[in-house]
Image: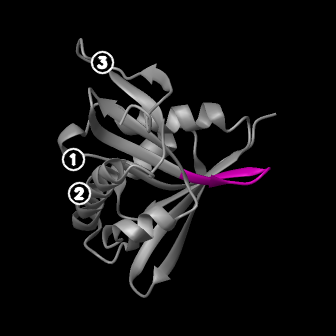
Amino acid sequence: MEDSARRIRRRLPGCDNHGMRIADMTLDDEALAKEVLAVQHAAYAVEAEIIGDDRIPALHETLDEMCAEPLTWLGAFDGDRLVGAVAWSETEDEVDIDRLVVDPGAHRRGIGRALVEELTSRAGGRRITVSTGRANTPARTLYERLGFGGAEDAEVIPGLWITRYARPAEG
């Protein structure tokens, strides 16, 4: 796992002596990829319960499907255990957060916030976009507190609503 999570970027708030760290990840390591998928499924199961709809595509994604996505990944680790991850795609002008997942057993510890803040620091002032379930109040609150605005609702599948946010480019 150390090869897949090489670069420690920052410690997370509220950490014990072992410390949590944010690190770059690749999904080339099958064991790490399986860990990411398990956290992703657990996190999206919580969102499905919150929004009352389990048709979230990432909730049903297979290991092969997840690994085939052309995304850049950061993981949050508590010791050797993955407790959260963020994945994104990017262009010269914009960064799109594709998924932000936190292990339900690690909620309310600032992990999601730390991952988005780290990604924001890497965005180099570019516009950042993200979508979440319209009824997912915890996620919406997080993004709004981190400066995302311009909320726009969209029905992506009949009856499944998301809210799209953007954090404007700096400068």
Residue at figure coordinates x 56%, y 52% from the top left? 88
Residue at figure coordinates x 28%, y 19% from the top left? 14
Q: Are marks 2 and 1 in contact (CB under 8 Å)?
A: yes
Q: Is disc 2 placed on a helix, strand or loop?
A: helix
Q: Are marks 3 and 2 in contact (CB under 8 Å)?
A: no
Q: Residues within 10 Å of mark 1 (few under 14, many from 20)?
A: some
Between disc 3 and disc 2, whose residue precedes? 3
Q: Are marks 1 and 3 in contact (CB under 8 Å)?
A: no
| Residue 94 falls within the magenta-colored stretch | yes
Q: Identify residue for label 2.
A: 42
Camera-side residue: 125 or 140? 125
Between disc 1 and disc 3, whose residue precedes? 3
User: Which span of residues is magenta-colored?
Assistant: 88-96
Q: Which secondary structure dominates the residues rendered in magenta?
A: strand
Residue 125: quadrant of the picture: top right
The number of callouts visible is 3
| Residue 48 falls within the magenta-colored stretch | no
Q: Quadrant of the N terminus?
A: top left
Q: Amino acid at mark 2?
A: Ala
Q: Identify residue for label 3.
A: 19
- Real-space CA distance between mark 1 and mark 3, rounded to the nearest whole angstrom: 19 Å
Residue at figure coordinates x 46%, y 68% from the top left? 162
Q: From the top left corner, tell me how far across and down residue 142 is, in percent.
A: 42, 42
Camera-side residue: 137 or 41? 41
Q: Identify residue for label 1.
A: 104
Q: From the top left corner, tell me how far across and down residue 72 is, in percent.
A: 56, 49
- Real-space CA distance between mark 3 and mark 2, rounded to the nearest whole angstrom: 23 Å
Q: Residue furthest top?
A: 17
